[in-house]
Amino acid sequence: QVQLVESGGGLVQAGGSLRLSCAASGRTGNANAMGWFRQVPGTKREFVAGINWTGSSIYYADSVKGRFTISRSNAQNTVYLQMSSLKPEDTAVYYCNTAPTLNSLAAKRPDFGSWGQGTQVTVSS
């Protein structure tokens, strides 16, 4: 099983920036793809960004394109999400996860497999 620990969330004003980090440990052999999801209570968990092992394939949800940048350190099994020009609608709990491919990562179900505790991002207007 993979253990995931997210950090870096907080309270920021609209227009501000935050950098999230997620460290994966345990059985990370299939962690070719890593990425970020977010969820507002009562709504569906949204796949926000994903990156493959080499960084040659990256996905961003339309809602964050041009504002968020995903990167990773394979040596440290860590994925990052640099968030800029934050908006109040970015407020959510952010989770990371891993999978063999970006497609399988995007299909991750919140009620299945390992998930971290998430990190709260709150953007005030």
Image (cartoon, rainbow, N blue to C red):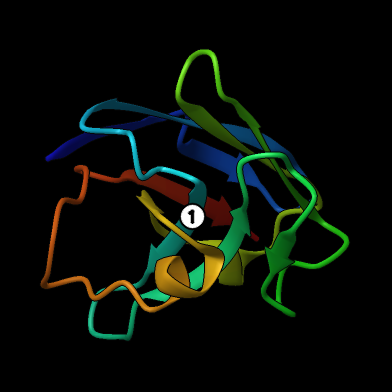
The foreground one among 57 and 24 is: 57
Q: Position of residue 75 (x, y in %)?
A: 54, 14
Q: Is residue 29 left or right of residue 83?
A: left
Q: Is residue 79 left or right of residue 14?
A: left
At label 1, counting other C-alpha atoms closer than 10 Å, the crowd grade (few under 14, some 14-19, many 20 or more) is: many
Q: Is residue 113 left or right of residue 66?
A: left
Q: Is residue 93 above or below residue 117?
A: below
Looking at the image, the residue that sits furthest to the bottom is 43
Q: Position of residue 56 (x, y in %)?
A: 80, 50
The foreground one among 62 and 25 is: 25
Residue type marked 1: Trp
How many badges with numbers are in the image? 1
Q: Quadrant of residue 9?
A: top left
The foreground one among 92 and 56 is: 56
Residue at x 59% of width, y 57% of height: 50
Q: Quadrant of residue 90?
A: bottom right
Q: Is residue 92 left or right of residue 62?
A: left
Name the quarter where the N terminus is drawn: top left
Residue at x 48% of width, y 51% of height: 122
Looking at the image, the residue that sits furthest to the right is 66
Looking at the image, the residue that sits furthest to the top is 75
Q: Which residue is mark 1?
A: 36
Q: Quadrant of residue 2?
A: top left
Q: Secondary structure at mark 1?
A: strand
Q: Position of residue 17 (x, y in %)?
A: 72, 38
Q: Position of residue 120 (x, y in %)?
A: 36, 46
Residue at x 11% of width, y 73% of height: 111
Name the quarter where the C terminus is drawn: bottom right
